Image: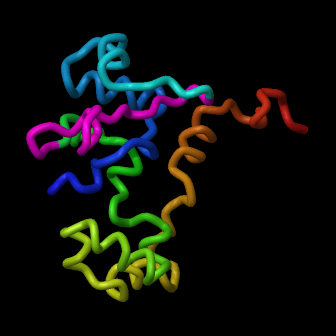
Amino acid sequence: MCGECCLGKGGVYLDRPGAEAAAGCMGLAFARFEELFLEREPSGLYSVASSPGPEGHCLLFRDGLCLVHPVKPPICRAWPRLRAIVTDPGAFLEAGGACPGLARLDFEGLSSEYRGGGRALPPRSFKAVLLAKARPSGVGPGGRGEG
């Protein structure tokens, strides 16, 4: 809960239902939440904006806490169980250098959950999962039906 993973811009996406849930969690109308915290992506998803300044924390992180913790974005819920971190010892060590919580874990212990199929690997891209969920069945990336 140090907020190191909440630094910087990019990679935190919400679909419309996720953004509406976050707005509700904060007691805000969706339009106001969007205005204050989100950037609309061409894909139709929303990215969470970061605050200006040298630290550049996620705008949903204040005073050491996530403002939407009960409904936080999928990638935030998954941390530190991201594909690269649970499959690549080098990525694990690099992430552990910036994350005090991850630094307390060991790679073998974390990755053993996924070896042997005991737990499904996280998706390669949480953004892709949200896009696929938002896309109507049978509609390809270009918006045309496939088949």
111 or 2: which is nearer to us?
2
Residue drawn at (28%, 33%) of the image: 51
Residue drawn at (37%, 57%) of the image: 78
Magenta-drawn stretch contains 57: yes
Q: Is residue 118 visible?
A: no
Image quarter for residue 81? bottom left
Residue drawn at (20%, 39%) of the image: 61
Q: Which residues are magenta?
A: 43-65
Q: Return the residue found at the far front.
A: 54
Q: Is residue 46 left or right of residue 55?
A: right
Q: Is residue 49 visible?
A: yes
Q: Is residue 12 left or right of residue 129?
A: left
Q: Is residue 130 left or right of residue 110?
A: right
Image quarter for residue 133? top right
Tell me the quadrant of the picture where the C terminus can be found: top right
Query: What percent of the width, then of the height, locates residue 34?
Result: 37, 18
124 or 10: which is nearer to us?
10
Q: Main secondary structure of the magenta part?
A: loop
Query: What percent of the width, then of the height, locates residue 108?
Result: 36, 88
Please say if 81 is above or below 3.
below
Query: What percent of the width, then of the height, locates residue 125?
Result: 55, 53
